[in-house]
Image (cartoon, rainbow, N blue to C red):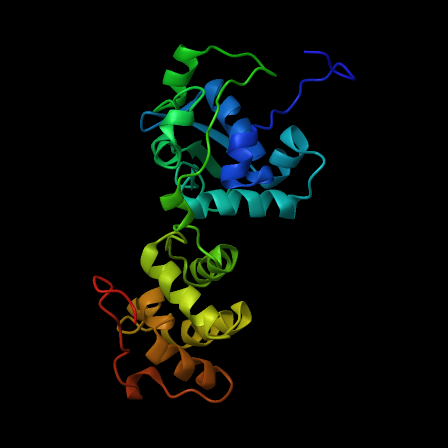
Amino acid sequence: MNLLIQESPLQVLPSLAMQVGLNEAMVLQQLHFRSLISNNIRDGYKWVYKTYEEWKNDEFPFWSVDTIKRAIRRLEVKGFIIATASYNRMKMDKTKWYRIDYQKLQLHTEEQHAIMPIAKSAEEEAQIAPTTEGEMPLAITKETESSKKDIVEYELDVVSVIDYLNDKTSKQFKANSKASVQLVTARLREGYTVVDCQKVIDAKAKEWLGDPRWQKYLRPSTLFNATNFENYLEESRGSDLPASSQPEPFELDFSKGET
């Protein structure tokens, strides 16, 4: 490859960029490459362990940390990347471990247009096409029509709200849970904002977090339910009733979906 300067290039796969976005495609491709040479193996998978600052310094110095966070979060929400901090030795260490869900990617491609089938794991991909830095062979094809329907309109806002809830309650709700996405997105489409969601979380966490009976209701199915949310938001603007004097929160049966 003839380069302007002698430097290891980052690959941009046009078909992958069409599927997930330009920034996201670059993150995925580089995560794939780092996975191939990773020695971090947990539960049978190779993982890449990096802080956002390390992603910037080591991989994408031309992006801000916020840009990297947005790209990774979009990929997490869509299920293309699996991220966890559960392998860290210290609970206070929130640095995430990342791997690609190759099966999820395979479901979002059209096999008849594939240049090379996506491997089920980084190890299999390495066997198919061993690689060195600057030579990253993974190719992903155009998005299928069905996958387009799965894109969450407010995905970054949903992630922001669920992350905020987890921070306030020390819980681990998933931002890509269909129920959570459905609830938070419904409230945002009604004209409420992320700040409104945070106000509800703050108010109910302050009220319920220390109460064994009520702290179980600090969950998306309670807080962002249409019947509860408006009342909780109004309560956050004034004086709240003590938990013991409130009725049980209303919750939906998500096997039928929210109407």
> Quarter holding the N terminus?
top right
Q: Residue 193: image x %, image y %?
A: 53, 71
The answer to which quarter of the image holds residue 147 is top left
Q: Is residue 63 left or right of residue 249?
A: right
Residue positioned 43% across, 14% down in the render: 126
The answer to which quarter of the image holds residue 251 is bottom left
- Given residues 168 and 161, the one toward you in this image is 161
In this orientation, does residue 50 appear?
A: no
Q: Residue 250: image x %, image y %?
A: 27, 77
Residue positioned 55% across, 39% down in the render: 24
Residue 258 drawn above or below residue 85: below
> Quarter holding the C terminus?
bottom left
Q: Residue 3: image x %, image y %?
A: 74, 15
- Given residues 226 and 146, the one toward you in this image is 146
- Given residues 142 and 101, the one toward you in this image is 142
Q: Residue 219: image x %, image y %?
A: 34, 65
